[in-house]
Amino acid sequence: MKINTAEFVISNSDVSKCPKDFLPEYAFIGRSNVGKSSLINMLTNHKKLAKTSARPGKTQLINHFLINNNWFLVDLPGYGYAKVSKKTKSIFQEFITDYFESREQLVCAFVLIDIRHEAQTIDIEFMSYMGESEIPFCIIFTKADKISRVKIDSHIAAYKKKMLANNWSEMPHYFVTSSTESTGKEELLQYIDEVNQEVFKNNNMF
């Protein structure tokens, strides 16, 4: 798939105000400072589509971007270490949950994980929530250019071991990416394209 157009549509904290279009949506979420905005900009060929910041936790709303006029990329607030008040954090964590559990247009979520670090409990717990809630998701390991291939393989193996130990029957589908080097871009967009083809073929799925 080639992304020809990427247009910002709306930001809000109320799922009921999300676009009414019945187009497939792909939500991107991860811990703060995981490189989500850089990944989105890399995928869409737009340097400033998603706002990047040196301060973790910049994204605090549900952001919809219309891609190629036939699917939505959804940029969600990070979970974990955002430097915001407890009250603010509880509010946007609540609408993240609302989004995942009520948004019919969501066909796949991408959980972003910084590949530089060994398996983090907060990521395992979040993916367990996704699995228990039967929300389809894939893993995107980010910042692959920062460590060696040996460490990448070792850290992925550690995640697989932890997930299998937490009652997962298998490791979810995953991608290894680097926003700096565009690693994984083609594979990720091809996956989205294949899912879109299935959605449009079975256009009564919503």
Image: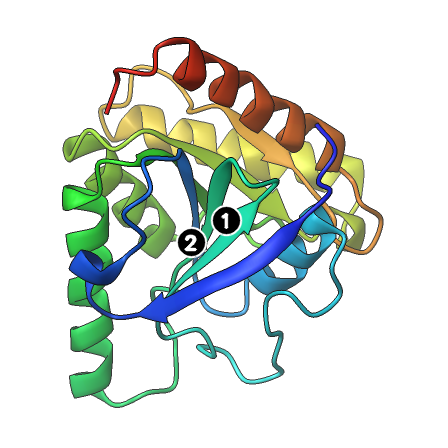
Q: Residue 96 carries which label?
A: none
Find residue 123 and report its horizontal and vertical position in percent: 37, 50
Find residue 81 and report its horizontal and vertical position in percent: 38, 74
Tell me if mark 2 has few (under 14), some (14-19) or many (20+) residues whose alpha carbon lies within 10 angstroms of its own: many
Q: What residue is drawn where x is 35% and y is 10%? A: 202
The residues bearing labels 2 and 1 have C-alpha atoms spaced at a distance of 6 Å
Find residue 99 and report its horizontal and vertical position in percent: 22, 52
Where does label 2 land, which residue?
Answer: 29
Colour style of the rendered protein structure = rainbow
Q: What residue is drawn where x is 15% and y is 33%? A: 132
Tag count in the figure? 2
User: Does the rendering let one see residue 116?
Assistant: no
Q: What residue is drawn where x is 33% and y is 56%? A: 122
Q: What element carries label 1?
A: strand
Q: Horizontally, is 87 left or right of 161 in the view?
A: left
Where does label 1 land, which residue?
Answer: 112
